[in-house]
Amino acid sequence: MLIAIDGPAAAGKGTLAGRLAASLGLAHLDTGLLYRATAARLMRGKSNATSEQAATAAAQSLSAGDLEGSQLRGERLAGLASLIATYDSVRSALIDFQRDFAASPPRGAKGAVLDGRDICSVILPDADIKIFVTANAEVRAERRYQELRGRGVHSIRSVILREMQERDERDRRREVAPMVLAGDAFLLDTTNMDADAAFEAAYEFVMLHHIENGRSE
Ligand code: CDP
């Protein structure tokens, strides 16, 4: 079973994807980490961090080990990640990693959940289940603020909101693989839902869809 989840920053994609994966025995890949890890490699290197060539080389040399570690979660990296995510050659370099993960999930899992921006549209257009998770921008900014606070990172709500909106705009407007609500995706607006309610709504959708597919086979 393949589940594709897209949506803007801090909409709760990662939490939802992780919980769906755990309850269905699937592997989970947060594809944002690929862009963040590429950005982290660039920041460590001496080259011009925003050059397409350097970013592509960094994306090509990523390995699974680069995706570990909480240092990838910072807002500064998110900014650079969102910039290099507009480069066609960076995105192309990361496609195989994502599709290989879905085709052969680690630890013998019987499928995978991938979350990101272009999973329903570009990476897994034939996924069994597609979900677009969103929430109003202020609510998402508050969630990110609380998440950072929980990790002991001091931040300013208004700055988080502004930077998040800039990234969302860039993700929506870019020419290559923009963030879109795929026509066949289930739209899950979590503005008034906590993580449990979002999980229950998505789980119910997965189960219903599964039953319907079973009937039509
Ligand atoms: O949730 P947040 O935006 O803070 O971060 P993320 O999901 O870890 O993604 C970081 C950045 O990577 C996003 O702003 C996108 O520009 C980019 N990204 C992408 O273009 N395509 C994906 N499948 C995942 C992330």
Image: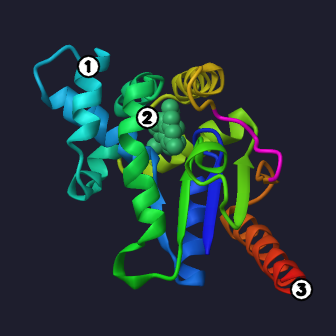
Q: What kind of secondary structure does the magenta stretch mostly adopt?
A: loop
**SS type, badge 3:** helix
Distance CA(mark 2)–CA(mark 1): 12 Å
What residue is disc 1 on? 53
What residue is disc 3 on? 215
> For the residue marked with disc 1, what is the amino acid?
Gln
> What residue appears at the point 64 percent right and 47 percent down from the top-left corner?
11
Please give the label number shown on residue 91. Answer: 2
Front-most of 49 and 147? 49
Quadrant containing the C terminus in the rendered view: bottom right
From the top left corner, tell me how far across and down residue 27 is, in percent.
46, 73
Front-most of 105 and 81? 105
From the top left corner, tell me how far across and down residue 195 is, in percent.
66, 64
Residue 75 in sight: no
The answer to whether 97 is drawn above or below residue 80 in the figure is below
> What residue appears at the point 42 percent right and 72 percent down from the top-left corner?
105
173 to the left or right of 87: right
Quadrant containing the N terminus in the rendered view: bottom right
From the top left corner, tell me how far across and down residue 12 is, in percent.
61, 53
> For the residue marked with disc 2, what is the amino acid?
Arg
Distance CA(mark 3)–CA(mark 2): 37 Å
Q: Which residues are magenta?
A: 179-184
The answer to whether 59 is drawn above or below residue 110 in the figure is above
> For the residue marked with disc 3, what is the amino acid?
Arg
Distance CA(mark 1)–CA(mark 3): 49 Å
